[in-house]
Image: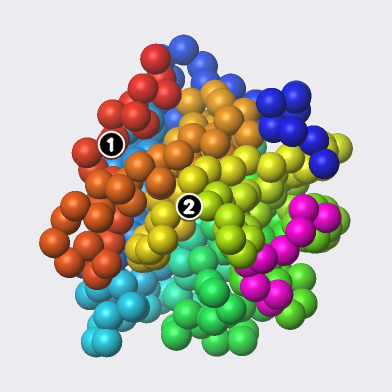
Amino acid sequence: MTNATTLSAPVLYERAGAYIPRIAAVHDLCGYGKCSLGVAIPVLSSAGCDVCPVPTGLFSSHTAFPGWYMHDTTDILDDYLAAWRGIGVEIDAVYSGFLGAPEQVDVIRGLYEEHPTALRVVDPVMADHGKVYPTYTPELCQAMAELACEADILTPNLTEAAIILGEEWKGTDISDAEAERIVNALVERGAKHVVLKGIRREGEDVVRNFVGGVGLDVVEVNNAYLPYMLHGTGDVYASCLLAAVMAGRTLVEATAFAGDFVHDAMLVSAEQPNFRDRGVSFEPLLGKVSALLA
């Protein structure tokens, strides 16, 4: 295990002058609850990126509410992306999150083939705290696990990592050695770089995340723990991490930025009415994302 301050981590995206990178954001669109594209678009736009949404589903709200509506967009995606090809859309990164059906993995692979130099970023949004999300079938979990192994940057929580590896979820209180094993196992499966999120040990006041990759040591990046959970923090985390990467930061620097941003956004959220339901309030902090370009 290596300390984050001593790691010589690679820069995964070289920002070229005034060029504005273009990102295909393959996520669902959620009407209420501040997650998925509702997070990715403003966060990445604040980092000077051109965000091009590819909606994998339409939700009335996030699924933590007792009543919600979902429309699966799988049937429109081939025509949607064919129209992009027709006008010559070029992509610098493909950033995927929540998927609506197993067939959408093939849609993402199509983007990989059409844009072979694009950075492949997979946030394998399918489960947390040992439970799979209600719209995810075993077939969709398997398809997501396969996609995860093709990522340049993979950002699973512990539950998602267990699904990808076909292992039992062991909770969030795991040792450094176990976290390192999981990161290396995901790399061995094919992911080039991995950020394993959400290790929290009994009695501690920090959240630990572990970063590794091909030919790299595994390092820990941590931030302060807050004693409440908000829906959408994973989307904010992954979007902030990618924002920092697209601004030319190393993956370790990007991981630290993402963790600190989510922590601060949760503090802002706690000052809002019904904050546990409405999602993470990141909007007042978008200046921090813009400052990545300074």
Circle 1 crowding by C-alpha within 10 Å: few under 14, some 14–19, many from 20: some
Left or right placement of residue 39 versus residue 17 in this view: left
Colour scheme in use: rainbow
Viewer can see residue 50: no
Q: Looking at the picture, tell me which residue is in the foreground, 131 or 224.
A: 224
- Residue 76 in the image, given as x and y percentages of width and height: 37, 70
Instruction: Reply above or below: 104 against 182.
Output: below
Instruction: Kindly identify the residue that appears in the image at 58 percent across and 55 percent down.
Output: 204
Please identify the quarter of the rendering in which residue 142 is found.
Answer: bottom right
Q: Is 171 one of the magenta-colored residues?
A: yes
Mark count: 2
- Residue 240 in the image, given as x and y percentages of width and height: 44, 41
Instruction: Kindly identify the residue that appears in the image at 46 percent across and 57 percent down.
Output: 234
Q: Looking at the picture, tell me which residue is in the foreground, 167 or 262.
A: 262
Q: Which amino acid does label 1 sit on?
A: Leu
Residue that badge 1 annotates: 285
In terms of secondary structure, where does tag 1 sit?
Answer: helix
Q: Is 204 one of the magenta-colored residues?
A: no
The residue at the far left in this view is 273
Q: Looking at the picture, tell me which residue is in the foreground, 106 or 155.
A: 155
- Residue 66 in the image, given as x and y percentages of width and height: 27, 87
Magenta segment: 169-177
The image's mark for residue 52 is none
Residue that badge 2 annotates: 225
Please identify the quarter of the rendering in which residue 108 is found.
Answer: bottom right
Instruction: Kindly identify the residue that appears in the image at 27 percent across and 67 percent down.
Output: 276
In the picture, which quadrant includes the N terminus? top right
Q: What residue type is labelled 2?
A: Tyr
Please identify the quarter of the rendering in which residue 260 is found.
Answer: top left
